[in-house]
Amino acid sequence: MKSILILFFYFLSIIAVTGCATFLMYHNINGWGWIIFIDVLLALMTVKVKEEK
């Protein structure tokens, strides 16, 4: 259950950051490039979950 929650919040953060960058692009607000950079870093990050027995 722990691993499912961790992966859920990991993918949720990627989707939220992408949505924020899309909102800024749509409204022509400067600074969305940094958010795309953060999104790429999140996508390249490796998530390791160790299950306790």
Image: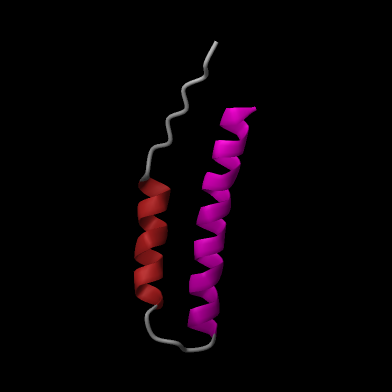
Give the quadrant of residue 19. bottom right
> Which residue is located at x 37 percent, y 46 percent?
44
For the C terminus, give its image quadrant: top right
Give the percent coordinates (x, y) of residue 27.
Answer: 53, 88
> In the visual, does 1 lie left or right of 39?
right
Q: Residue furthest front?
A: 52
> Which residue is located at x 37 percent, y 80 percent?
31
Magenta span: predominant SS is helix
Give the quadrant of residue 1. top right
> In the visual, does 16 lie left or right of 34?
right
Residue 19 counted in the magenta span: yes
Which scheme is used to colour this image of the protein?
secondary structure
Give the percent coordinates (x, y) of residue 48.
Answer: 42, 30
> In the visual, does 49 lie left or right of 3?
left
Residue range highlighted in magenta: 1-26
Q: How many badges with numbers are in the image?
A: 0
Q: Residue furthest top?
A: 53
> Which residue is located at x 57 percent, y 46 percent?
9
Residue 17 counted in the magenta span: yes
Give the quadrant of residue 46. top left
Q: Residue furthest bottom?
A: 28
On screen, residue 10 above or below 17: above
Q: Residue furthest right?
A: 1
Give the percent coordinates (x, y) of residue 40.
Answer: 38, 56
Give the percent coordinates (x, y) of residue 22.
Answer: 53, 74
On screen, residue 30 above or below 8: below
On screen, residue 27 above or below 40: below
> Which residue is located at x 52 percent, y 71 percent?
20
